[in-house]
Every structure is written in structure tokens, then in C-alpha cells.
């Protein structure tokens, strides 16, 4: 899976890409992440990427020309055209089924990170991206949203997680669409709190049944909407 992230703040990605599951997936060439600075696609000597909104109002708007030129050049960097995604609070809400569809339908994602008051509408009219929101709140920029997107998709690339079943059984995932059961590890007892006996029994059928029941109980308590 290939990601091209288009941003005004490429430095934000270096720490994120050098850690844990993502860095290992990059090392194993299961995933690649290419970060591009939209400012490199400006033509004036001040490298201007934003301007005041026509009609007045607060803030600055990302200009159409550098953004569209950047996307077109980045698209041409690989034979796979890729799905263009624009991060915006106005987009389709990201959830696990959408992540699963994206991961199974596409091999390459070109992700646009907005800043300030967002993009000139013509970026959307011309590029026809998939507009994605990570939730009903407003971030300062699309970088964190694009990391959320990359993080959730990378887990779904076969072989990236130690055990591919993890992404099957996780909360919201294709295995059940409800919440996961509680998990325990050593020690068996801590401050009077014991690990449930059944998990130590070695009886796989009983463990499976306990997990199913707990998963349902967890979902009823915390997210009954998932059972509707
Ligand atoms: N003025 C825009 C509006 O009201 O729809 C919000 C712009 S926001 C301050 C700046 C950038 O942050 C957006 O262009 C987008 O890239 C990103 N962003 C903010 N909230 C987001 C969210 N919930 N999901 C995805 N991206 C978001």
C-alpha cells in the first residue's frame, strides 16, 4: 500500500513514521509513505500557498493552483493513479467498515492535508477527491487526520500485524462489528483483582464462549447503538 501525503508541515510525519508498526511495515516494504510539501509547487518567490477569501471573512484559504499542480505531479510519480482523499470536517465520517473498504479496493492513497480555513472549493470541483472526516470536531490541520487514516489502513494490510486475525477480532471490525472482550496478561493477581479463571483453564471452547458473552456485555454497556 502506498501513501502520498500532501502537506504544508512535512516535519510532522517524521516521528510518526519512525515508530512501531508503521516503521516496521515500511522497513518490510509492505507500506510506503511519501510526504510532499505543497509549498514546493508554488511559482512565486514568496512560496505563497494561501490568500484571503473572496467575499471577506476570517482566515486564509489554500490556493487552488499549487494544490492541484501538486496532486497532478504526485499522481504521475507512480503507475497506480491512486485515490485522492481530502481531509475535511465536512467529509464522510471515517469508521472501520470504510477503512476496510478502502484497504481492499485501493493500493495507493494521495492524501491532502488542509490548513487555515481549508481549501479553495475548486480543488474539490477539479480533483473530485473523496472527502473524509475523522469526526465531528475541527482540527487545526489535516495532518493528524491523515495520520489517523494511514494508521487505520496500515493495520489492514495483510502481514503488517503479527497475526492478521487481530484486525478481524478488533472492536468494530469485520469479525463482529461490536466491541472486543476484556483482555488480561500477567500477573494473575494484582491488588486483589484476579484474572478470570476460565482464561487460565486451557479450555478453548469455554474461553471462546466467555469472550463472546463478554464482548456482547461490553457492547451493551458502552455502545448499545452497535447492537441496533
Ligand atoms: N473551515 C473549515 C470548515 O469549517 O469546514 C475547517 C478548516 S480546519 C480549521 C483546517 C483543516 O484541518 C481542514 O482543511 C482539514 O484538512 C483539517 N481538518 C479539520 N477538522 C477535520 C476533521 N474533523 N477531519 C478531517 N480533517 C479535518
Image (cartoon, grey):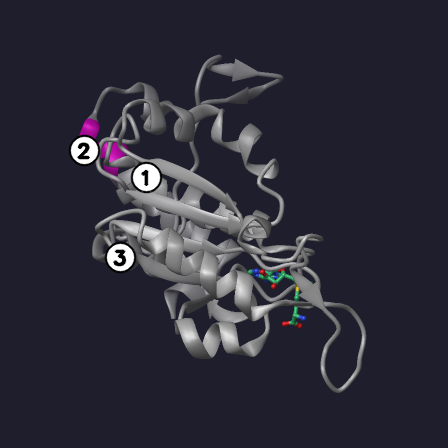
Pointer 1 residue:
211
Q: Give residue 211's position: percent from left, percent from top.
A: 32, 39
Q: How much space separates mark 1 and mark 2, taking CA atoms?
A: 10 Å
Q: Give residue 70's position: percent from left, percent from top.
A: 46, 56
Q: Nearer the viewer, residue 86 or 144?
A: 86
Q: Looking at the image, tell me whether mark 3 or mark 2 is earlier in sequence order.
A: 3
Q: Give residue 40's position: percent from left, percent from top.
A: 55, 48
Q: What secondary structure is found at the residue carrying circle 3? A: loop
Q: Give residue 43's position: percent from left, percent from top.
A: 59, 57
Quadrant where the C terminus sits is: bottom left
Q: How much space separates mark 3 and mark 2, taking CA atoms?
A: 47 Å
Q: Can I make out residue 182 in this image? A: yes
Q: Which residues are magenta?
A: 204-208
Quadrant where the N terminus sits is: top left
Pointer 2 residue:
205
* Residue 87 shown in magenta: no
Q: How much space separates mark 1 and mark 3, taking CA atoms?
A: 43 Å
Q: Main secondary structure of the magenta part?
A: helix
Q: Is residue 209 above or below residue 50?
A: above
Amino acid at each position: 500500500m502506498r501513501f502520498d501525503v500532501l502537506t504544508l508541515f512535512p516535519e510532522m510525519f517524521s516521528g510518526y513514521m519512525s515508530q512501531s508498526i508503521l516503521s516496521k511495515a515500511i522497513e518490510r516494504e509492505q507500506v510506503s509513505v511519501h510526504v510532499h510539501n505543497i509549498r514546493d509547487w508554488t511559482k512565486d518567490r514568496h512560496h505563497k500557498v494561501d490568500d484571503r477569501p473572496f467575499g471577506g471573512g476570517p482566515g486564509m484559504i489554500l490556493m487552488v493552483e499549487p494544490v492541484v499542480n501538486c496532486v497532478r505531479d504526485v499522481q504521475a510519480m507512480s503507475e497506480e493513479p491512486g485515490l485522492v482523499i481530502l481531509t475535511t470536517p465536512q467529509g464522510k465520517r471515517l469508521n472501520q467498515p470504510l477503512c476496510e473498504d478502502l484497504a481492499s479496493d485501493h493500493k495507493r492513497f494521495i492524501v491532502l492535508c488542509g490548513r487555515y480555513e481549508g481549501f479553495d472549493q475548486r480543488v474539490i470541483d477539479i480533483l473530485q477527491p473523496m472527502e473524509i472526516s475523522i469526526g465531528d470536531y475541527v482540527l487545526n490541520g489535516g495532518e493528524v487526520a491523515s495520520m489517523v487514516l494511514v494508521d487505520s489502513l496500515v493495520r489492514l494490510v495483510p502481514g503488517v500485524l503479527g497475526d492478521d486475525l487481530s484486525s478481524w477480532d478488533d472492536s468494530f471490525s469485520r469479525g463482529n462489528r461490536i466491541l472486543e472482550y476484556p483482555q488480561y496478561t500477567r500477573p494473575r493477581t494484582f491488588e486483589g483483582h484476579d484474572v478470570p479463571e476460565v482464561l487460565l483453564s486451557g479450555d478453548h471452547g469455554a474461553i471462546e464462549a466467555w469472550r463472546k458473552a463478554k464482548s456482547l456485555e461490553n457492547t451493551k454497556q458502552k455502545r448499545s447503538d452497535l447492537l441496533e
